[in-house]
Amino acid sequence: METIRAAVSHGVGEPLVIEQIQLSPPGDNQLRIQIEAVAICHSDITFIDGGWDCPFPAVFGHEAVGRVTVAGPGTKTPVGTRVLVTLIRSCGTCPTCSSGDRVHCEDPRDHMNGVIQTMEGQPIFHAMNCAAFAEAVVVHESQTAPIPESISVAGAATMACGGITGIGSAVNTAKVRPGETVVVIGAGGVGLNAIQGAYIAGAARIVAVDMVESKLDDAQAFGATDGILASGPSPWRRLRRIAPRGADVVLVTVGAPVAYDTAPKYLGVGGRIAVVGMPHQDATATYSPMNFGYAGHQMLGSLMGDTVLSRDIPWMVDLHGQGRLKVEEMVSKTWSLEQINEAIADTRTGAARRNVILL
Ligand SMILES: [Zn+2]
Ligand SMILES: [Zn+2]
């Protein structure tokens, strides 16, 4: 056990407290990583606000970059490697992993008797397999991917959740084809990456939908061809002026239930919706099931963009190097660990692309 500093949550809605906790050395197939940057994701805030049940105390944070300092038995990543740290943990051998689906690994894990505990030896909830609001983490090697120095530390952190979730929702989940019309609801950190994903996949029209005018301007800088302000009446009707057949794909990148109520209204015949944003656990949506049968609509779940890290990170890094993928542009502002509550408050406003804590 070693002592590190972490931002610990002690209860729903309470501010995080920077304090010392204990971190175990890496076991089989685990790496110890010194965290250099961790971004704040709306999923962290959903847990902090009680939108998803979890025990406390807890350490959140799952969108990070750092350097391997200790490699546990059975790992292949050399000490010193700069890596992304994400929540996607895959054993590689369960039926789900074996089928190529790495985000839904069924290997059981114990988040309360994991690698972190209080200085008194009491359990701390190891949130999302990461607990990266901390100076260091111990994670399964499958949760990491090498990331070159050519990507800034803050930018690289944003790839670990917002980047892969958005890009992957278009490329992996919805499998956008050249010429398709793609509607992206929400032009925040995940939405802008979904727009980039649709652009990379060759969508003919990429229509951003948001409640805030300035975010529609942002969306165009990331590849959107059109914008629809959702604050007006029946915004889906305006899509028919841009794409008379309606959308082939709607990527819902926000957690607000109303976005799920309205998503099917944008669809054309045979269209598909990807559920990308993560609503609170008690949220429900309402839509006409008849249309799904009659018009051949589909609804697809998209967890972490159905990313396979070893397959997807290398091409994303390559596109970034060619100037074809925006990464650094995702960072709104950087903060110190001591400022984490301010950074969370700023993220809650919805104005930020990504706030990143630098350690
Ligand atoms: Zn996230
Ligand atoms: Zn598995």
Image: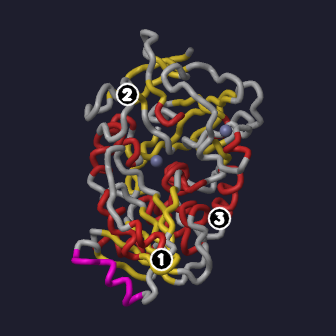
How many numbered circles are shown?
Answer: 3
Residue at 47% across, 77% down: 295
Cβ of mark 1 under 8 Å from ligand 1: the answer is no
User: Which of the two discs, 1 and 2, labels the residue nearer the N terminus?
Assistant: 2
Residue 277, position as x, y percentages in the image:
42, 55
Q: Amino acid at mark 1?
A: Ala
- Relative to residue 267, is residue 174 depicted above or below? above
State which region is magenta.
Answer: 232-242
Q: Which structural element holds mark 3?
A: helix
Q: Looking at the rendering, in which quadrant would you find the N terminus?
A: top right
Q: Is residue 88 visible?
A: yes
Residue toward you, 70 or 201: 201
Frontmost of labels 1 and 2 is 1
Q: Amino acid at mark 3?
A: Gly
CA gap between label 3 and label 2 equals 36 Å
Question: Does the magenta segment cover residue 235?
Answer: yes
Residue 263, position as x, y percentages in the image:
38, 68
- Relative to residue 297, is residue 237 depicted above or below? below
- Relative to residue 105, is residue 152 depicted above or below? below
- The residue under label 2 is 8
Residue at 37% across, 79% down: 227
Classify residue 86 as left or right of residue 267. right
Please give the label number shown on residue 151: none
Q: Which structural element holds mark 1?
A: loop
Question: Does the magenta segment cover residue 69?
Answer: no
- The residue under label 3 is 321
Classify residue 129 as left or right of residue 334. right
Residue 82, position as x, y percentages in the image:
64, 43
